Image (cartoon, rainbow, N blue to C red):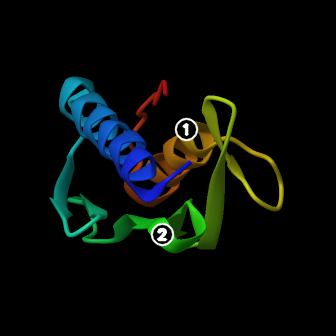
Amino acid sequence: MNEAQFNQIVDELMFSIEETIDDSGADLDYENSAGMLTITCEVNGSQIILSRQSAVNEIWLAVKSGGFHFKLDGDQWCNTVSGEPLSSMLSQACQAQAGETVGFDF
């Protein structure tokens, strides 16, 4: 996959995450800037950060519990170590950091 294709796929993913947060009614705020989506948990100010890493075709997730790398495997973003889907880990991070249940489906 070339860089333009990667960026298109990640743009669509970020937009999907934003829409899911909006539709969930969760007390989460987000800002998408320069290839980075920052989700702020209003209850305590903690952040969940997703960033695109075009050079290695990965998405990196930074949460209180640590940092994780994801590669596209077919049509799903999977943790490069555990194989766990990004959608699942992002949902877990929202629950752990904000006490909010958000079901991501991408």
Residue 48 position by quadrant: bottom left
Above or below residue 13? Residue 43 is below
At numbered mark 1, what does the secondary structure look like: helix, strand or loop?
helix
Give the amino acid type for the residue marked by disc 2 in the picture: Gln
- Say which amino acid is labelled 1: Ser
Q: Residue furthest front?
A: 2
Q: How crowded is mark 2: few (under 14 residues within 10 Å), some or many (20 or more)?
A: some
Residue 80 at x, y = what percent? 76, 59
Dot 2: what SS? strand
| Numbered label attached to residue 87 | 1
Query: Vertically, is 55 above or below 5?
Result: below
* Relative height, residue 69 to residue 4 (above, below): below
Give the foreground label among 2 and 1. 2
| Structural distance between the alpha carbons of marks 2 and 1 | 18 Å
Q: Where is residue 76 in the image (x, y as percent from the top left)?
A: 63, 34
- At x 61%, y 39%, the residue is 88
Residue placed under numbered mark 2 in the picture: 53
Q: Which of 73 and 26 is in front in this view?
A: 73
